[in-house]
Image (cartoon, helix red, strand yellow):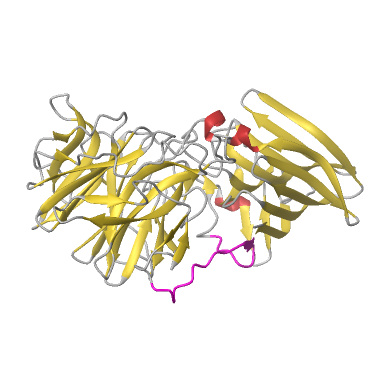
Amino acid sequence: MKYNNPIIKGFYPDPSVCKVGDTYYLATSTFQYFPGVPIFESQDLINWKQISHCLTRTTQVDLGEVKSSGGVFAPTLRHYKGRFYMVTTNDSTRQNFFVWTDDIYGEWSEPIEVDQGGIDPDLYFEEDQTYFMSNGQDENGIHGVVQCQINITTGEKLTPSRMIWQGSGGRYIESPHMYKINHWYYLLVAEGGTEYGHMATYARSTSVSGPFEAYAHNPVLTNRNLGGYELQAVGHGDLIEDNNGNWWLYHLGFRQIGQWLTYHHLGREVFLTPVTFDEEGWFTAGHNGTTRSSFETDRISNDIIQHEQRIFTFENTNWNLDWCYLRFPQTENYQFTDHSLMLTGTDITLDHPLSPTFIGLRQKDFRAVITCDVEITDGEAGITLYMDEHHHYELAIRGQQDHYEVIERLNTQDIKSVQQTVVLTSNSASLLIKAEPTCYHFFTVIEGEEILLGTAQTKYLSSEVAGGFTGVLIGLYATHQQAGHPAVFSNFKCEYID
């Protein structure tokens, strides 16, 4: 069959995958968003459905006043003796921890901390021993991939941390994952930074603790030399074997907005690339070591059809799975029904690294039409295209009593400007945003007529401009509502256009 990348679209970075029986499970990063670390499920490697989150309680992770791109970094998802484990880093507190569950659809445990620094932790299980790895430095101050043994019940370190590999020479070695395949131990890492120089490299050993011999042709996967190609920043991956003995690499990457326009604002996404082992036990990946927007393969049955949801509404999304909040929400300010949403805004705005009244969906493709009807009594409410507290665009209704207007506001670092307003004759408005790869166009619809308020470039919401590790969310928000006067959102629809 032919399948298309990304496998999971939008801001779902740092994928980690495991298999239990015939079912595959995948986790990704969430940074400052809550709930934390979504879990996806698949039967065929291609089609993924979100089923839960790992971090659903405030006792599990401190998000507090975490700035954008802080909080929960890359997870590793593993299954051992009937139990799932997810290990990750709260970068804002510089603490590595893991949680566990016996029910992948249910709640996860309270966090168990591990006293080893670095980020992107990994768990490897063998013969009742648990090896914990992260990037960072060991107890002698040597940098690289650092390993120790831990008690998987308590998180207690059982051995000193020691450096086991320093990579192939690229900067920012990260995301170590250990596997035993036949009699070899493979250590897969990312190097080059999660940007245009990103790459996957690996080494192998006959011992879990090394010494490790680097693959002679590293990097095993990178798109860094594919100038003008849409898919870039390939790296940070996790190997998985399917039921037929084929190997695959799930990894991150991003899509730039144009052939020669090196900006990306959808975030880092999940890609799938085939892996092939040779007779000597070394493996290669992809098309001559690169990831492509599609792969033709006989490893997957032609009977499997790659499905893609193109329309998102209140009715066909799950408030607890598809939508997310900025940090810990004040739940009393959110009221949900099957067909509408009521938000009560506070004095906290989208400019603050706190928790404004906000709930968002990840933007999944460049071309989209986003519509929503909004009614207010006072304050402001509308749609935001949100990258971080310094970079976001709004289309909203604001006012009180007999004066209401629709506004288009652009926030780019220190420049915050209402670009255009349209005076209304009532306290409700129909909002419309048309998204393209390079621009967003903002409208209000009055008596069937689309009135353009303005246009803004997507690149000012990109990681290349804003920095950070996240992507644009399509958010619904409210600010400065009086008690008992929530903003009402209805007829929400986000439709992606081919």
Residue at coordinates 35% horizontally, 52% vertically from top-left? 286
Res. 482 image quadrant: top right
- In reply to whether residue 315 is colored magenta, the answer given is yes
Residue at coordinates 20% horizontally, 37% vertically from top-left? 115
Closer-to-camera residue (250/86): 250
Q: From where the camera sits, is residue 15 visible?
A: no
Q: What predominant SS class does the magenta segment belong to?
A: loop
Q: Which residues are magenta?
A: 301-319
- In reply to whether residue 236 is colored magenta, the answer given is no
In this picture, is 70 found above or below 435? above
Left or right of 38 on screen, residue 439: right
Left or right of 333 on screen, residue 26: left
Residue at coordinates 20% horizontally, 32% vertically from top-left? 166
Q: Position of residue 270 (x, y in %)?
A: 43, 52
Q: Position of residue 120 (x, y in %)?
A: 30, 41
Closer-to-camera residue (389/282): 282
Q: Position of residue 26 (x, y in %)?
A: 37, 58
Res. 399 image quadrant: top right
Q: Position of residue 74 (x, y in %)?
A: 35, 44
Res. 378 image quadrant: top right
